[in-house]
Amino acid sequence: MTDLTAAITAGGQSSRYGSDKALAMLDGRTLLEHVAGSLDTCPVRVLIAPAGKYALPGWTPVPDTRPGQGPLAGLEAALTAAPPGWVAFAGVDTPGLTPAYWHALAAARTPDALAVVALDSEDRPQPLAALYHTDLLPQITALLDAGERRLRTAAPQAQTVLVTSLDAAYFRNVNRPEELGASG
Ligand SMILES: Nc1nc2c(ncn2[C@@H]2O[C@H](COP(=O)(O)OP(=O)(O)OP(=O)(O)O)[C@@H](O)[C@H]2O)c(=O)[nH]1
Ligand SMILES: [Mg+2]
């Protein structure tokens, strides 16, 4: 994955979780560390979060361009900070991601694609564990300027490769404490 820049967007409020879910513990590591571990071999790694909020060795903190405006704004900050090319973009709350997941997405890229998005076992797109190309940046900025906040609008369908049949375990998503279960 040496040609991917890693970006974790961590500017959320965890309002459903009730405390900062990035720091919630699962199997001895924080959720943030689980996600970071899936991307540690990427040469450039950025954490979209307020300066000083998290200590994540090897990851460069990058502040939001539009604080509090959601993950689409987090993606804008990530694509702005990244060198030209592909960015592996993840939230803090998907601890099932692994290097193999990102390899599967990277292998699905086509020459015309600007995004690679997995579908879960119910065919729902997973834009918070997806690849985006930095060439999307001007259109994402235009979307945000026009008031758009939905991450799923980040890339046009015609330039999005969909990846199916991946293991459901990759898509574990923690929004509430009960979703961490006894292991939390
Ligand atoms: N950079 C950045 N990331 C965000 C922002 N809002 C949400 N995120 C991140 O997007 C990911 C998924 O968001 P949610 O699951 O809705 O997390 P959240 O907004 O913290 O939680 P809720 O308040 O319960 O919706 C998480 O990694 C969040 O940290 C934001 O304004 N800026
Ligand atoms: Mg949210």
Image: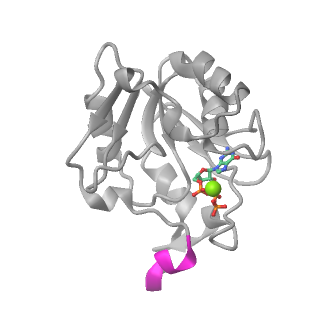
Name the main secondary structure of what is drawn in magenta. Answer: helix
Q: Residue furthest left?
A: 165
Q: Check the image and report above or below for 134 versus 102.
A: above
The number of numbered badges drawn on the structure is 0
* Front residue of 43 and 128: 128
Magenta segment: does it hold 174?
Answer: no
Q: Quadrant of the N terminus?
A: top left
Q: Can the viewer see residue 80?
A: yes
* Front residue of 12 and 148: 148
Q: Residue at x 65, y 26 (%)?
A: 81
- Residue interval drawn in magenta: 176-183
Left or right of 82 in this view: 5: left
Left or right of 106 in this view: 149: right
Instruction: Where is residue 140? Give x, y as percent.
Output: 60, 25
Instruction: Where is residue 15? Give x, y as percent.
Output: 69, 66
- Rendered image quadrant of residue 27: bottom left
Magenta segment: does it hold 179?
Answer: yes
Q: Residue at x 71, y 46 (%)?
A: 49
Q: Residue furthest bottom?
A: 182
Q: Can the viewer see residue 1?
A: no
Q: Residue at x 42, y 39 (%)?
A: 130
* Front residue of 25 and 153: 153
Q: Residue at x 55, y 39 (%)?
A: 151
Q: Check the image and report above or below for 180 versus 160.
A: below
- Rendered image quadrant of residue 138: top right
Instruction: Where is residue 157? Give x, y as percent.
Output: 38, 27
